[in-house]
Image (cartoon, rainbow, N blue to C red):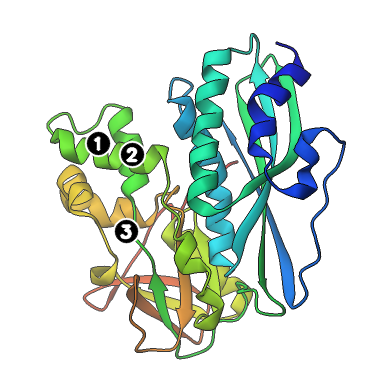
């Protein structure tokens, strides 16, 4: 199939928003929404770097979309639309495309989001997917990295390090791990679970926020730098799944806090909050992030993933 046949058969059915015009035009429209700001984010994933070339096409699609939804959740924005740029290795396989768009369709239903447009091209290199996601937040209420206040508590959603555990399993670690634990961790690597529903209300409680994509310590470091504060993380409070503990044992904490691909939300807010998150530390005067075990600082040699 040529580019236009691929778009018509596989991607036009995903363009349910009126402003997408069924992908029959060169551009799309987004209706104004009085009282709200439009929040835009973009991420690229590529075979061999962010997923394995042999991963199921549906999970590749969902990971590509969800890493963007994680950014919107950390900003307190409700997702609405996305643009998809797809660089496909030759030849384009219809079976793969059908599975890929099935994954996107499932996520569109789950998260209430619609394809708005994009571009499809052929490449001699690895599969590459770039998505730009858009959402809305009440005007002036986007949760930035720069709003942390002295005395704030630091919270994080979900558990930390599971995706890295799944990647380690796919690379050959954990031969004796149970099938249940293996499935759980590999699923977390292939299909992130960003806190999208929780993110819709984040602006009601958070002073600052960041999505945990490069590693908990690294991303909190970005927040601390932007806010001009220091952050202390209490190691015993970092939420770690039982499956990950069984995989890595005594090394779990050190590896988990430096691992990427969690796609959870870390945020600062007043003390005393309760909800689908864990209090892991506090904001104080100073700079950087200190990880402490029983009150003693622990040095993390490589605090997060780096692309270069």
Residue receiving disc 2: 187
Tag count: 3
Residues marked 2 and 1 touching at CB (< 8 Å) = yes
User: In the picture, which quadrant includes the C terminus?
Assistant: top right
Q: Residue furthest right?
A: 26
The answer to whether residue 128 of the structure is visible from this angle is: yes
Disc 1 crowd, CA 10 A, few/some/many (<14, 14-19, 20+)? some
Which quarter of the figure has residue 31?
bottom right
Image position of 250 (left or right of 253): left
Q: Is residue 219 left or right of residue 236?
A: right
Q: Which mark is residue 158?
A: none
Residue at 45% from the left image edge and 91% from the top image edge: 151
Marks 3 and 2, how far apart at CA: 14 Å
The residue positioned 32% from the left and 48% from the top of the image is: 162
Residue 55, how many percent across, how many down? 43, 25
Closer to the eye: label 3 or 2: 2
Residue drawn at (53%, 69%) of the image: 200
Does residue 221 appear in the picture of this structure?
no
Residue beneath the point at 35% across and 44% down: 188
Frontmost of labels 3 and 1 is: 1
Label placed on residue 183:
1
The residue at which mark 3 appears reads as: 159
Question: Around disc 3, counting alpha carbons within 10 Å, would you say few (fewer than 14), some (14 to 19), or many (20 or more)?
Answer: some
Q: Position of residue 293 (x, y in %)?
A: 25, 71
Q: Is residue 279 left or right of residue 236?
A: right
Circle 2: element type: helix
Give yes or no for contact between labels 3 and 2 (Cβ–Cβ under 8 Å): no
């Amino acid at each position: 199939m040529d580019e236009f046949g691929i778009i018509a058969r596989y991607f036009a059915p995903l363009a349910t928003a009126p402003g997408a015009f069924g992908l029959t035009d060169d551009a799309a429209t987004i209706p104004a929404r009085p009282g709200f700001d439009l929040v835009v984010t973009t991420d690229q994933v590529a075979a061999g770097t962010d997923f394995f070339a042999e991963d199921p096409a549906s999970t590749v699609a969902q990971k590509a979309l969800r890493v963007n939804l994680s950014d919107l959740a950390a900003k307190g924005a409700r997702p609405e639309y996305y643009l998809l740029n797809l660089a496909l290795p030759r030849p384009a396989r219809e079976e793969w495309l059908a599975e890929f768009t099935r994954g996107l369709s499932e996520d569109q239903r789950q998260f209430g989001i619609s394809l708005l447009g994009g571009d499809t091209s052929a490449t001699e290199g690895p599969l590459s997917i770039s998505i730009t996601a858009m959402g809305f937040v009440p005007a002036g209420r986007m949760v930035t990295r720069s709003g942390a206040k002295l005395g704030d508590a630091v919270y994080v959603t979900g558990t930390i390090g599971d995706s890295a555990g799944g990647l380690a399993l796919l690379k050959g670690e954990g031969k004796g791990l149970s099938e249940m634990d293996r499935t759980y961790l590999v699923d977390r690597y292939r299909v992130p679970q960003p806190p999208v529903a929780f993110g819709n209300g984040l602006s009601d409680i958070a002073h600052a926020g960041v999505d945990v994509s490069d590693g908990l310590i690294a991303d909190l470091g970005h927040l601390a730098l932007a806010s001009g504060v220091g952050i202390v993380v209490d190691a015993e409070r970092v939420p770690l799944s039982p499956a990950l503990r069984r995989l890595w044992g005594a090394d779990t904490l050190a590896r988990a806090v430096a691992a990427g691909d969690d796609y959870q939300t870390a945020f600062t807010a007043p003390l005393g909050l309760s909800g689908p998150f864990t209090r892991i530390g506090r904001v104080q005067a100073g700079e950087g992030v200190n990880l402490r075990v029983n009150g003693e600082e622990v040095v993390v040699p490589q605090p997060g993933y780096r692309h270069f």
